[in-house]
Image: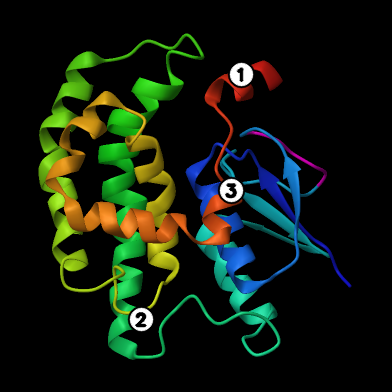
Amino acid sequence: MTELLLYGVPQSTFVRTTRMALQERGVPYTPMPCPPGHVDGEARHPFGKIPFMRYGDLVLAESLAIIRFAEREFPAGRYGPSLWPDDPRRVALCDQWVSAICDSIAQRIGGGICFPRLAAPVFGMPVDEAAVAAAVARLPATLAELEGPLSRRPYLTGDTMTVADLYLVPILHYLGQTREGQAVWPDFPHLAVWQARMAERPSVRDTVPPSFEALRRAA
């Protein structure tokens, strides 16, 4: 059987989402530890990011492309159920949330708060406190956009977990490690219930990342 090789580091939010998605589907893969910018022969990310994968002669970058490929190459029935809903409207809603999480939420929370608070100090990188303050000021409004749908349904798009939920898990995991995230978290009870529900899934438990300090030591 052709082996799916997944390149990246476990601390990456997008690598973790990809790993969770593959595990949820029961798709076998081999993690290939590598930092951003890594090249393994023809296997690489065109812009030096992670994750990327090799599957036989196919080299593919970007988490969503890898997850969608696995949906088709490893079909439901023989493997686990699809990570996208059946209903066209819910599919559109799922794709909307994936796009929003990868763009706006990743920038506002991941890049704006989590990276400067958790990763930058470990690697001796400067922190723009004014930029962090601006991101923190937007944090309640950002979380409110997630609290709204989760007050009406158990998952972002309905009664079943989808790939959209898997994209949100790693970002909120890191937010919960910051003092800014901890300060506002009690104001979003439905988001907290969702996070606890997701934390019960084996794919989430099995992919909790090591610290950034461990990544620095390995560099």
Q: Is residue 87 above or below residue 173?
A: below
Q: Residue 91 — which label? A: 2
| Residue closer to the observer: 199 or 93 | 199
- For badge 2, the amino acid type reads Val
Q: Is residue 2 magenta?
A: no
Using the rendered image of the protein, determine whether residue 119 is visible from the camera's viewpoint.
yes
Residue position marked by numbered label 3 in the rendering? 207
Which range of residues does the magenta coloring cover? 37-41
At 83% from the left edge and 63% from the top edge, which residue is drawn? 3
Q: Is residue 109 above or below residue 2?
A: above
Q: Residue 21 — which label? A: none
Residue 103 % position (x, y)? 32, 50
> Is 29 positioned to the left or the right of 165 in the image?
right
> Is 116 positioned to the left or the right of 186 in the image?
right
- Answer with mark 2 or mark 1, whichever residue precedes in sequence: 2
Using the rendered image of the protein, determine whether residue 219 is visible from the camera's viewpoint.
no
Q: Residue 216 — which label? A: 1
